[in-house]
């Protein structure tokens, strides 16, 4: 019996990295292939005679619930870090997108970190990068300012990713592929997205795959232009905003809506001129926007589909 990890999938063929660091292409037993998510990138498996005969238990899953189809779509598994990559120039920085990725990180049970790429192109008049990082301090997140073209700026990030499995997420064009290339000293060179006229990158990565380089294990994922959270239950969403939830416990009424006119709301007592309060209120704003989104589909319907 050979133990290995799935690093790439092409239809019903699975490239698996064995403990001796050799990659072999395998099929899988019929009972393993009962559905598309039976084997995903990141899975640890047991192989016999060129076939996957067992998928070991997962520590976590990268997934989204497809309400229309009534099933869970799993993209990858067994990840240690969710590396949220943003751009300091183009594509344009989106605060709300960071908050959406953080919601998924907490839902998936994966530690998130924030990476701001293209710092060589940063224009301080566009947004206050120090405040954007400060607003996440209560979450205890690690943040990094880098330029993928400057290998020295990648050293701290490289040390953070060492001996961990990381999945990079972010809009197309933020430089995920260039970061991976830089982190591996050019050993892994993936096709980079070129920015179009409107500042949106082309979708160059179309599937998840694991790339290895010495002590770095990185899952490269498809770039996205939007990141919906409408499959999340309303009753669960607050739990994915731990900083907002902490303050909400101080509200006079347990069913507080946190709207401006809500009586006894703890957020109404915050001073918007105070930087810590301003940061927390910005997170509340993200929560309220997402709450409106998830409320479009009633929780009973989402539960019935799981």
Image: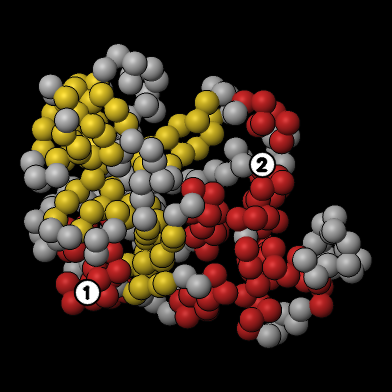
Mark number, residue 155: 1
Badge 1: few (under 14), some or many (20 or more) residues near its Cα, within 10 Å? some
Q: Is residue 84 left or right of residue 274?
A: left
x 16%, y 40%: residue: 17
In the rendered image, which residue does mark 2 sit on? 233
Q: Residue furthest right?
A: 263
Residue at 9 percent of width and 56 percent of height: 187
Task: Give the residue furthest to the front.
Answer: 1
Residue 157 seen: yes
Between 76 and 228, the residue placed more toward the observer is: 76
Displayed quadrant of residue 261: bottom right
In the rendered structure, the answer to whether residue 288 lies left or right of residue 240 reads: right
Q: Residue at image x 49%, y 48%? A: 108
Earlier sequence position, callout 1 versus callout 2: 1
Residue 56 left/right relative to 70:
left
Task: Answer whether residue 100 is visible to the viewer in this image.
Answer: no
68 versus 8 height, above or below? above
Q: Position of residue 144 (x, y in %)?
A: 36, 73
Q: Is residue 114 above or below residue 25?
A: below
Image quadrant for the N terminus? top left
Q: Position of residue 298 (x, y in %)?
A: 73, 34
Q: Disc 1 and disc 2: Cα gap in Å?
A: 39 Å
Local SS, label 2? loop
* Label pair 1/2, CB-CB below 8 angstroms: no
Compare residues 2 and 151 and report the one nearer the observer: 2
Figure quadrant of the C terminus: top right
Question: What is the crowding at mark 2: few (fewer than 14 residues within 10 Å), some, or many (at least 20)?
Answer: some
Q: Position of residue 228 (x, y in %)?
A: 54, 43
Q: Nearer the viewer, residue 283 or 21?
A: 21
Q: Residue furthest top?
A: 30
Judged left or right of residue 32, residue 1 is: left
């Amino acid at each position: 019996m050979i133990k290995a990890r799935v690093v790439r999938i092409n239809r019903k063929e699975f490239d698996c990295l064995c403990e001796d660091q050799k990659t072999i292409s395998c099929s899988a037993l019929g009972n393993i292939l009962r559905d598309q998510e039976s084997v995903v990138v990141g899975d640890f498996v047991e192989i016999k005679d060129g076939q996957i005969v067992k998928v070991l238990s997962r520590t976590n899953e990268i997934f989204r619930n497809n309400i229309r189809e009534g099933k869970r779509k799993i993209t990858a598994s067994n990840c240690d870090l969710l590396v949220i990559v943003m751009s300091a120039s183009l594509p344009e920085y989106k605060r709300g997108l960071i908050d959406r990725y953080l919601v998924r990180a907490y839902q998936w049970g994966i530690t998130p970190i924030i990476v701001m790429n293209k710092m060589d192109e940063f224009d301080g008049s566009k947004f206050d990068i120090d405040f954007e990082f400060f607003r996440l301090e209560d979450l205890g997140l690690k943040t990094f300012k880098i330029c993928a073209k400057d290998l020295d700026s990648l050293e701290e990030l490289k040390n953070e990713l060492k001996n961990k499995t990381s999945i990079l997420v972010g809009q197309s064009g933020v430089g995920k592929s260039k970061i991976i290339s830089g982190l591996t000293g050019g050993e892994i060179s993936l096709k980079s997205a070129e920015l179009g006229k409107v500042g949106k990158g082309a979708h160059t990565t179309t599937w998840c795959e694991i790339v290895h380089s010495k002590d770095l294990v990185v899952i490269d994922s498809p770039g996205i232009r939007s990141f919906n959270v409408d499959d999340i239950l309303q009753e669960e969403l607050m739990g994915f905003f731990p900083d907002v939830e902490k303050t909400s416990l101080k509200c006079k009424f347990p069913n507080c809506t946190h709207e401006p006119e809500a009586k006894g709301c703890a957020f109404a007592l915050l001073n918007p001129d105070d930087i810590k309060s301003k940061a927390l209120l910005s997170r509340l704003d993200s929560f309220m926007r997402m709450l409106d989104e998830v409320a479009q589909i009633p929780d009973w319907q989402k539960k019935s589909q799981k």
